[in-house]
Image (tube, rainbow, N blue to C red):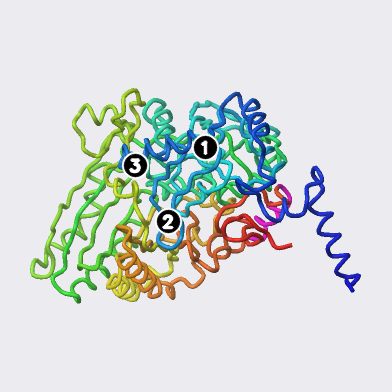
Amino acid sequence: MVKRRDLLKAAAALALVTGTGGRALAAVFRRVRPGEAAWPKPADWAALKRAVNGRLLEPEAIRASLANIGDHPGNPFFLGDEPAGTQLSGWFKAWTPAPSAYAVAAESGEDIAAAVNFARKHGLRLVVKGGAHSYQGTSNAPDSLLVWTRHMREVKMIGAFMPEGCTGSAPAVAVDAGAMWIDAYDTVTVKGGRYVQGGGCTTVGVAGNVQSGGFGSFSKGFGTAAGSLLEAEIVTADGKLRRVNQCQDPELFWGIKGGGGGSLGVVTKLVLRTHDLPEFFGFVSAVIRAQSDEAYRQLIVRFMAFYRDALCNPHWGESVQVRPSNQLHIGMVSQGLTEAEMKAAWQPFLDWVSASPGDYAFEEGPALGTAPARYWWDAEARKAKGSHAFNYDDRPGTPVQNAWWRDDSEQVGAYIWGYDSLWLPASLLGDADHLAASLVAASRHQQVELHFNKGLAGAPEEAISRAADTATNPAVLDAFALAIVANGGGKDDTAAQKGAQAVDAATAILAPLAPAGGSYVSESNYFNRDWAKAFWGRNYPRLLAAKRKYDPEGLFFVHHGVGSEDWSPDGFSRPG
């Protein structure tokens, strides 16, 4: 006999899932795949195609896109312009690129709303892609309907922007969801003479970057991209296009500031604060080799103390690499300093290295210089002057600003073996010996990168305050750097397994330095079991509450995204 309690539980579950259109239980708790009886009929797809003015890409077009990807494997703009394209070629034992069954090549919020409504009505797996730069593979999924925002790339400066329903204004820039940071920098800095806080890689999508938190080369001076968000337009799971800010739907607005892309809705437009542009941006580069393990340890001790005393301030960003080969690779940038001021800051450290030629040698550099800040992302001017800093999109008819940093080329088409990150609190700088010992010990397994611009210790109070009012893990506020341990290569399982183990071994040595340090959601371990705490810390319960309010049925799903604990790893089934 069926127990009365079980009948009540079943009835309650059915009531929860048949509230919109009377859909059957299976249609909500198990999303539909192609070939199944509940998969939309040709007439349904034809109706969606009409609703989006013909901008529905059908399987034949997507298969053709997949075949095209091999034409320009090293061009990130080409990969992003293909509906089946992804920046990475996958992650060992994690994910491989998988094209959607259909895609809406959206050109407006109305297109996106039509796709969202269709996916909700038919119980489809929905996926969102803009820049296609997701390390976690969250912008692609097989058997899904793709909302593809790549064609929405308008960027427009606003002299004085006041969020709807609020008071007070600020200079700003409005950026459509498919724009990349090079589009924003070209408009705001090259043409407009101002600065917008964005990503370091020029091909990163603006919308995804802001929703993940958003760090760029100069974040130590200007904070996070999420902290610069003034207003956004977003399509939520009910198909409603909302304009959100601190005065309208404030919890949703807070949630998309660092809460991770693809979990709360589909962002269609963002309005970001702009800043006065510094007169100069600059760079410092060098590779220093130590002649012994002990000399290497002393080098790292000295550098960390030097960073603490001279560089942990708003003027300095980017990174150093602590390499297994007893090399310290320095690749840092500055903002707002003259060349003389940069030299004055670095001379004591460089002199210390030069004073011990038996222990240290400069294998590259040191090189140091500045340029007018307005020129930094001027791809056309750099090309005309013969600069080799950028690679350029060589396809006929492409925008002149389609350029990416040459040093980022290895990311295009990369296959990840292992990857992890953790924020290192500024308190560690007080004991440079202990910090250096851990960094060197970790480097015996795998190179450790310290991204100083991805920790806000030393930033101006205003930048820290804006970042504190986002969903990003609060650990970033007092971190002097984000430590990244990663490697990759060919799709050889033996090499990949060994590489993944090396990353795990190095991370295990660093982890005790920051047991509550957390990890950056966009650059993190795919297999992190404690992902909610690592990515968002004490902010996660608040994020989850926003998810329950604006997407109660869980239409939006990404791997290790807010609310993903309710679903199977592929996002297709949900326990009843």
Which residue is nearer to you in this view: 152 or 137? 137
Q: Residues within 10 Å of mark 1 (few under 14, many from 20)?
A: some
Mark 3 or 2, nearer chain start: 3
Residue 568 is left or right of residue 355, and the answer is right
**Dividing the picture into quarters, in which one does residue 486 lie?**
bottom left
Residue 364 is left or right of residue 9, and the answer is left
Quarter that holds the N terminus: bottom right
Q: CA distance from mark 2 to mark 1?
A: 51 Å
* Amino acid at the residue labelled 2: Gly
The residue where tag 1 is placed is 59
Residue 89 is left or right of residue 113, and the answer is left
Which residue is nearer to you in this view: 245 or 401? 401
Marks 1 & 3, CB-CB < 8 Å contact: no
Residue 235 is left or right of residue 208, and the answer is right
The residue where tag 3 is placed is 336
What's drawn in magenta, residue-wise?
540-550
* Element at label 2: loop
Magenta stretch encompasses residue 227? no
